[in-house]
Image (cartoon, rainbow, N blue to C red):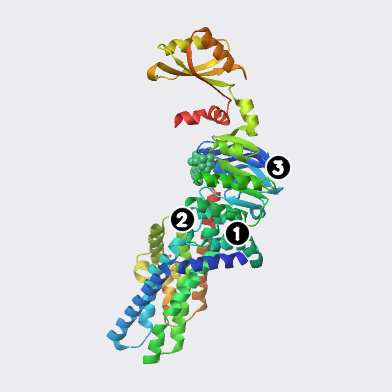
Amino acid sequence: MIEVRHLSKHFGRTVAVNDVSFDVSRGEVLGFLGPNGAGKSTTMRILTGYIPPTSGRASVAGIDLVEDSLAVRRRIGYLPESAPLYGDMEVVEFLRFVAEIRGISPGETRERIARMVKRCGLDSVIGRSIHHLSKGYRQRVGIAQAMIHDPDLLILDEPTSGLDPNQIIEIRELIRELGREKTVILSTHILPEVSATCDRVLIIDEGAIVASGSPQELSASHGSGEGVTITVRSSDPAGCGDLLRAAPFVSEVSVADGSADGLVSIEIFGTEQSGLGEEVFRFAVANNWTLAELRTEKASLEDVFRSLTRKEASVE
Amino acid sequence: MNNIWTILRKEFRSYFDSPVAYIYITFFLVLSSWLFMRGFFLVGQASMRGFFGILPWLLLFFVPAVTMRLWAEEKKLGTIELLMTLPVRDHEVVLGKFLASFFFLVVTMALSFSIPLMTALLGNPDAGPVLGGYFGAVLLGAAYLAIGLFVSSLTENQIIAFIIAVTLTFLLFIVGEEFVVYSAPSALVPILKFLGMGAHFDSIGRGVVDSRDVIYYLSVVGFFLYLNVRAVESRKWK
Ligand SMILES: Nc1ncnc2c1ncn2[C@@H]1O[C@H](COP(=O)(O)OP(=O)(O)OP(=O)(O)O)[C@@H](O)[C@H]1O
Ligand SMILES: [Mg+2]
């Protein structure tokens, strides 16, 4: 469905997208994940024909983006970041405008709008001026606008930003439902969203793809093993940390300071994929520690994201 | 073609969706009537000459106020990204917006027809000069609109768009006037005289429609609409 090859975009000296290549197959839901300024929106703008790439090429359904931008745009529904809409129009008037430009006949427009209203839950605001809508409803109107011509490919830039938790769940369900028949590319900062909606994830940092795969694959392959957090009663937290560091099954230890009533929380990362919890427990018993709590955590997508884009995070 | 029509209708309607249109129209009518009446009672002559003499200066402020929003707001609110990723060609959007503002101008002009009607009743002047004058004013207005629309595409600030458009239009209007030409090197004089928008309006304002003046105004419109398309495309050059 989409073929992207060595795509780059420079803004003066800023390299917003740096030699990116990927494919998206029909019916796939692909998530762009990355910190602020990673180049997610820029990549989407190139795919929707808003700006051309500095170098490289991309095609949608076999049509080259630069050669026949109009034909590509006909096949795409796009929700730009933060859903810019014409505030002075009424919701229905706006949807009619988009439908008309999309070449939908007046007779069919009515039915399409009715379908979008139902699908995106717009019944209560259909006659209202877009100015007066809440952020979440604007976002929904933006999604309705993107789907009105029933495109094969939907590109949604942060579709759930600004929505309340109920709406987030509704929109995610909508995206999952759409993903059964359509190709969807979405971007997000929210990690659980990726696991909830995407078949595949591209983690983008500083314009380049740093990892790609299904959410499960990513947590498995890039996770730094298991993590265990223990809380012990100790007057010498640093000593406990040193003891642990010397243990063969441990790769990394961090001791939280500021222990309240003698309780110390220690985070431990193991060298093996599993069994760390038992090892730590035995170690604590052998050293006669009073164990108040022991918690095992699987490496999550969050850890993967943090470890791959940490440079960015530490600057902020 | 259909897209131009769709955009034209959307933009035209959005003038009337806010009170702005009514303010513009009222302002234009009141001011032009007042200016006209003053001349009428002072000179005691029912002629449109005075009115058409003032019209270019009125339009100088009226037209940039009509066009300032058209691109600047799209840029400011980011709707330009939505619009330009729809399957429309850049020139279709430019033409749609231009024609919408043009029709708005024509509507306003048509409303100000109350003035020549009144003069016709009072003094019975020739219909020719009045029609010629209006024709010229529409052409001049179209040239102003094209300039204003182009300027609006250069900024996301409507006020700046307004100020720059007034300035640029003013400069283009006076560039052929005697006091400008006077200090210019003699080789440039015919060129300046030809480029000045004011000189071309003088004869039309008297009711004499010369095809060279018409072609001149249409060229100005074409030139600035072309620049406008290039400016919209310029997002692709970075
Ligand atoms: N029109 C532009 N002119 C100059 N620089 C730009 C332009 N658009 C984007 N950039 C730069 O390109 C980089 C990538 O921006 P982009 O908007 O694609 O990031 P993003 O991943 O969408 O970030 P966010 O998560 O904050 O939306 C940033 O450094 C940004 O400053
Ligand atoms: Mg973005």
**Alpha carbon distance from label 1 to label 2:** 19 Å
Closer to the camera in the image, B95 or A145: A145
Residues beneath discs 1 and 3 located on the same chain = no
Residues beneath discs 1 and 2 located on the same chain = yes
Residue type pointed to by label 1: Arg
The residue at 52%/77% (across/down) is: B211
**Which numbered circle lies on residue A25?**
3
The residue at 63%/58% (across/down) is: A115
Q: Nearer the viewer, mark 1 or mark 2?
A: 1
Position of residue B26 measured from the top left corner of the image (x, y, whole percent): 38, 74
Note whether residue A12 is visible: no
Judging from the image, mark 1 belongs to the subunit labelled B
Judging from the image, mark 2 belongs to the subunit labelled B
**Alpha carbon distance from label 1 to label 3:** 28 Å
Judging from the image, mark 3 belongs to the subunit labelled A
**Residue labelled with disc 1:** B89
Left or right of residue B172, residue A69 in this image: right
Position of the N terminus of chain A by quadrant: top right
